[in-house]
Amino acid sequence: MRVLPSDKTSAEQIKLIRKYLKLKIMEDNVSFINHKQERDHVYDLMKRTILHGESHSALMLGPRGSGKTTLINSVLNQLSKEVDISSDAIIVKLNGMLHHDDKVALKSITAQMQLENAVGDRVFGTFAENLSFLLSCLQCGADRKCKSMVFLLEEFDMFCHSGRTQSLLYNLFDITHSKQAPMCVLGITNRLDVMELLEKRVKSRFSHRHIFLFPNEDSGELRSPIDNFKQVLLRLLSMPCKKAPESPKRKKGRAGRRSVHIEEPTDVDTDDEYSIPEVVLYKCKTNREEFRNLDPGFVEDWNSHVNSLIEDDTITDAIEKFCYYTGNEQVFRNVLFQLICQLSPTKPYIDATEFSNTIDKTVAPEHRVKLLQSLSILELSLVIAMKHGMEIFDGQPMNFEMVLHRYTKFANTNSSTQTVPRPVILKAFEHLQALEIILPVRNTDSIYNTDNTTSRVQKEYKLFTLAVPVDDISEAVKSFKALPTEISHWYSNSVF
């Protein structure tokens, strides 16, 4: 690799590359690749709503880190270049973690529509009346036309939790269904069973348009997760560059790559797949002029180094281990961010061994063991009861009543075990579900198992299965210092 002439120059180059890559890894939530069909689908829905005044509703489903929010931001960024979104449409973003309460949601909607002054001290009887008033405030012109609106509902499943009325979803879907105003409602969630959580009246007004986004699938074709993350590594760690126009016949450099130069800030190609979009730099209050002093030779060597990383067997093994535990790209970005932060003049390149060690610390199974050890004695006892029950019934899922029966049987045979009321045990069982230590199972064998019938099943009789390996439970029980001896003995002896 090329050696820089002085430590001062080296420090400056490393500092610039480190800053650029940090912005690229952590702040660039606009650049989106792959999943062209899904992106075109979302782009078409939003464009038809904004330009033609159509109403649509859809759900985007996919695991965490698969790029759902990035896809939305990418589409909005493209539309902002084609139409004047600020004057033609209103983008309202809600998050189920924050706005699951109707009053809080309405307050946020009013603020994002900039209608606080219009509402003032008015008092409305229902959610629908309040929303209708907001829409009427947006109508203008002789034909009383309303601006197009795009509602983006992150964590969509949190708007559907049982025990809460789904007034927000009902009214939004009702507007798209009855075409009261041009509106596109797009729900974003990682739960594939979200339709089972919707009330019947909400389902009747939803278009049932689903857009699936899976990390290792593109246009119906499966890809290797290892190759997928190698491409992510290459895309995130490579610096933007272009061929030097003054020397078209230069010899090929390292790894067969042609000599390239960093683009000048004045004529930088913002469409370069390795460059940061201008909208991201503007958001971060960063000027591209800051990277003017980047040495083209050092950038060339850096990109050659990144290309050599994806061919290293140690890197491949580390990525394979990472894929075994998770497919979340955001977690992988965190790994790369840690490595970039450690760059210095004395260590200008990423070491393969250090890359492997960082992944070991990130996805090691100890975090699941620590999660199990953070449970209360009652919750861990329910996990043990479920583990024994699934072993006895050859891995068949269990409901709360079955787990309660095994736990009660154990508690009755041990006088030292404190008696716990049934509601408290049920609450502990629900907490295990919230932590995703146990996951619900949908039985597709029954011809009567439709969305309506499964939604009517009482929570005590819904089937669940363990979502953590038995080895992790064993490790948690062995190293749990405050665990009573009876429960440790119960874990190793399933007689109870």
Image (cartoon, helix red, strand yellow):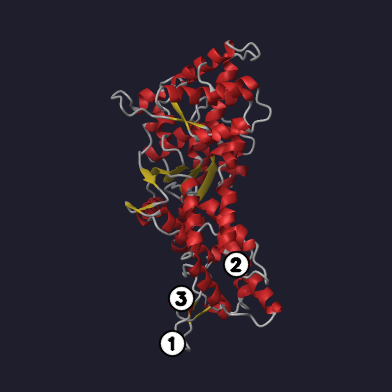
Query: In the displayed structure, would residue 475 be above or below residue 407?
Result: below
Q: Name the disc covering residue 248, or none.
A: 1
Hey, what amino acid is under mark 3? Answer: Ala
Give the mark nearer the N terminus: 1 vs 3: 1
Please tell me which residue lies in front, 77 or 352: 352
Q: Are marks 1 and 2 in contact (CB under 8 Å)?
A: no
Rendering coords of residue 69 (x, y %) = 49, 50
Q: Residue at x 68, y 27 (%)?
A: 482
Please tell me which residue lies in front, 131 or 63: 63
The residue carrying pointer 2 sits among few (fewer than 14), some (14 to 19) or many (20 or more) residues within 10 Å by Cα, namely many
Hey, what amino acid is under mark 1? Answer: Pro
Hey, what amino acid is under mark 2? Answer: Tyr
Pointer 3: what residue?
A: 255
Q: Residue at x 63, y 24 (%)?
A: 377
Q: Name the disc covering residue 20, or none.
A: 2
Query: In the displayed structure, would residue 183 be above or below residue 454?
Result: below
Q: Is residue 31 visible?
A: no
The residue carrying pointer 1 sits among few (fewer than 14), some (14 to 19) or many (20 or more) residues within 10 Å by Cα, namely few
Instruction: State the CA–CA distance, disc 3 to disc 2.
Output: 24 Å
Instruction: State the CA–CA distance, disc 1 to disc 3.
Output: 18 Å
Name the element at disc 1. loop
Q: Residue at x 51, y 60 (%)?
A: 314
Q: Residue at x 52, y 38 (%)?
A: 133
Foreground: disc 3 or disc 2: 3
Rendering coords of residue 481 (x, y %) = 68, 30
Rendering coords of residue 493 (x, y %) = 53, 21
